[in-house]
Image (spheres, rainbow, N blue to C red):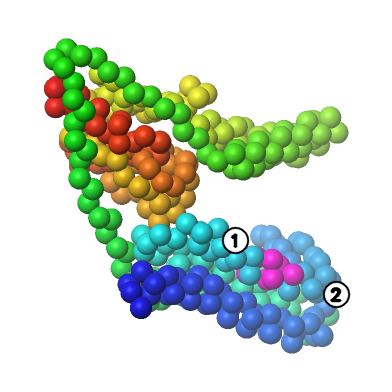
C-alpha cells in the first residue's frame, strides 16, 4: 500500500470510524436510560438551571442528527476531492471526531444525570459536563491527529518560462473565474430564503426573526461577492477583483519574485473554497484545477484558480524580468 492510500485509509478511520463508535456507545447508554427519565426532560440550561424541556427521545434524536450527521457531512463532502495528505485533511480528520465526541459526551451526560428524577427541573447544572465534554473532545482530537501521517509537502513547481515580448511591447491578459453553477445556485437560494424570512419577520412584527434573518441575508450577500472574479495581468502586476467590485486584490510587479501555473486541490491545500488563508499563502480558490500562483519577494504566495494560468504566469515572468 503506497503512502497516499495509507493516508486515505487512516483519514477514513478517524473521520468516520471513530465518530461511528462514539455515536453507537452514546446511543446505547441513552436508550438504556430512557425508562428512568422524567417526561419531559431538560434539554437546555440557563444561568438559573434547566429552562428548556422536551421529549425523552430528544437527546437520542440530537445524537443521531448531530453526532452522526456532522461527520458524514464534513468527511463526505471532502472525500471526492481527496488528492493527497494535505494539512487540511489531517486537521479535518482530527476535528470531526473531536466535535462528535464533545457533542455525544455532553448529550449523554445531561441525559444520564436526569435518570431517576421525578421532575427535570431538579437536574443539576451543566458546568462540569461542558468542561469534561470539551476535554474529552480535545483528547480524542489529539489522538486522531497523531495517528495520521504528517502532511505531505507540495512538490515545488518550476516558474514558467517568460513570454517573448519585444522591447516596449505592451501586453494584457485577463480571464473570469467563478464557483461552479450548482454552488452559485445554492448561494442564490440561501440568499433568497434568508431575504424572504426577513421580509416575513418585518411584516409580521416579529423583531427577533426579522433582525436575525436580516443579518443572515447581509452575511450571505457579503459572501456572494466572492463567488466570481475578473483576473488581469498587465504592466501594473496581477489584479483579481470581484464582479461586484469588492473585494479587490492587487500584487504589484515590484513585489513579484516569479510566477507559475500550479494545480490546486482546494480542501487539501486550503481547507475549502472561497477566499482562503493558510500560513504563507492566500488564495482566491473557487474550484479545483489550474491556478496562477505568484511568489512574492517576501516569500508569501498569492493564488487564484483560473483557466489559462500558464499564459498568465509566462506574461508575469516577462513583465517582472523587464521591470
Residue 147 appearing in the image:
yes
Please give the range of residues in magenta.
61-67
Residue ID at (55%, 41%)? 180
Which element is circle 1 on? helix
Q: Is the residue under label 1 in contact with that under label 2 (CB below 8 Å)?
A: no
How many neighbours does mark 1 have within 10 angstroms: few (below 14), some (14-19), or many (20 or more)? few
Is 266 drawn above or below residue 16 in the view shown? above
Q: Which residue is mark 2?
A: 39
State the image coordinates of residue 237 (x, y, percent, origin top left): 27, 24
Which SS type dominates the magenta stretch? helix
Which dot marks residue 296? none
Which dot marks residue 73? 1
Q: Quadrant of the C terminus?
A: top left
Q: Nearer the viewer, residue 221 or 313?
A: 313
Residue ID at (85%, 75%)? 39
| Eye-nearest disc, 2 or 1 | 1
Amino acid at each position: 500500500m503506497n503512502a497516499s492510500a495509507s493516508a486515505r485509509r487512516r483519514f477514513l478511520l478517524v473521520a468516520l470510524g471513530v465518530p461511528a463508535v462514539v455515536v453507537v456507545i452514546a446511543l446505547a447508554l441513552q436508550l438504556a436510560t430512557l425508562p428512568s427519565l422524567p417526561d419531559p426532560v431538560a434539554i437546555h440550561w440557563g444561568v438559573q438551571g434547566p429552562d428548556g424541556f422536551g421529549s425523552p427521545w430528544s437527546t437520542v434524536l440530537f445524537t443521531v442528527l448531530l453526532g452522526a450527521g456532522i461527520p458524514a457531512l464534513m468527511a463526505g463532502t471532502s472525500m471526492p476531492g481527496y488528492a493527497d495528505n494535505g494539512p487540511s485533511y489531517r486537521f479535518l480528520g482530527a476535528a470531526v471526531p473531536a466535535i462528535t465526541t464533545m457533542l455525544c459526551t455532553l448529550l449523554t451526560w445531561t441525559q444520564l444525570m436526569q435518570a431517576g428524577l421525578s421532575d427535570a427541573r431538579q437536574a443539576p447544572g451543566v458546568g462540569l459536563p461542558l468542561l469534561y465534554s470539551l476535554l474529552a473532545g480535545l483528547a480524542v482530537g489529539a489522538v486522531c491527529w497523531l495517528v495520521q501521517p504528517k502532511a505531505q509537502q507540495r512538490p515545488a513547481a518550476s516558474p514558467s518560462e517568460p513570454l517573448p515580448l519585444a522591447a516596449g511591447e505592451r501586453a494584457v491578459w485577463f480571464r473570469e473565474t467563478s464557483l461552479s453553477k450548482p454552488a452559485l445556485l445554492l448561494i442564490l437560494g440561501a440568499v433568497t430564503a434568508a431575504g424572504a424570512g426577513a421580509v416575513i419577520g418585518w411584516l409580521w412584527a416579529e423583531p427577533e426573526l426579522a433582525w436575525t434573518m436580516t443579518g443572515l441575508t447581509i452575511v450571505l450577500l457579503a459572501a456572494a461577492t466572492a463567488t466570481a472574479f475578473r483576473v488581469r495581468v498587465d504592466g501594473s502586476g496581477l489584479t483579481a477583483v470581484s464582479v461586484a467590485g469588492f473585494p479587490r486584490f492587487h500584487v504589484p510587479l515590484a513585489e513579484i519574485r516569479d510566477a507559475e501555473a500550479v494545480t490546486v486541490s482546494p480542501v487539501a491545500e486550503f481547507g475549502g473554497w472561497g477566499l482562503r488563508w493558510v500560513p504563507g499563502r492566500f488564495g482566491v480558490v473557487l474550484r479545483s484545477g489550474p491556478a496562477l500562483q505568484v511568489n512574492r519577494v517576501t516569500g508569501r504566495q498569492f493564488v487564484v484558480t483560473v483557466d489559462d494560468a500558464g499564459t498568465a504566469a509566462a506574461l508575469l515572468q516577462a513583465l517582472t524580468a523587464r521591470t
